[in-house]
Amino acid sequence: METPASTSVRAIRYDALRRRLLVRFEDGDEYAFVGVPGEAHRSFAAAPSKDRFFLDEIRGRYPYNKMT
């Protein structure tokens, strides 16, 4: 799992076969976003602000489930 520099995003990982992006936040909650293309994951991983990228490019664009 990658550990991006961020204030609220703790870690991200990507399942290319399922096109599923997993995002763990500082509060411990983890969400799986489905249908995320590999390019979006690569851009997220390289983004200087993970929080801003998440808000602008992930949240609200892909269906998600909270992981238990």
Image (cartoon, helix red, strand yellow):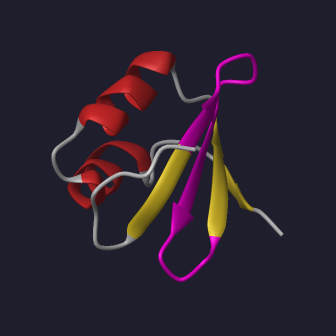
Q: For the view shown, which residue lies furthest in the right direction?
A: 68
Residue 4: x %, y % from top left? 35, 51
33 or 28: nearer the viewer: 28
Q: For the view shown, which residue lies furthest in the left direction?
A: 48
Query: Quick check: is 22 in the magenta stretch?
Result: yes
What's the residue at 22%, 56% (across, down)? 52
State the count of labels: 0
- Give the quarter of the image for residue 31: bottom right
26 in relation to 48, above or below: below
Residue 42: x %, y % from top left? 38, 25
- Give the quarter of the image for residue 36: top right
Horizontal relation, residue 64 to residue 39: left or right: right
Query: Quick check: is 21 in the magenta stretch?
Result: yes
Horizontal relation, residue 1 to residue 52: left or right: right
Horizontal relation, residue 46 to residue 19: left or right: left
Residue 53: x %, y % from top left? 26, 48
Q: Which residues are magenta?
A: 13-29
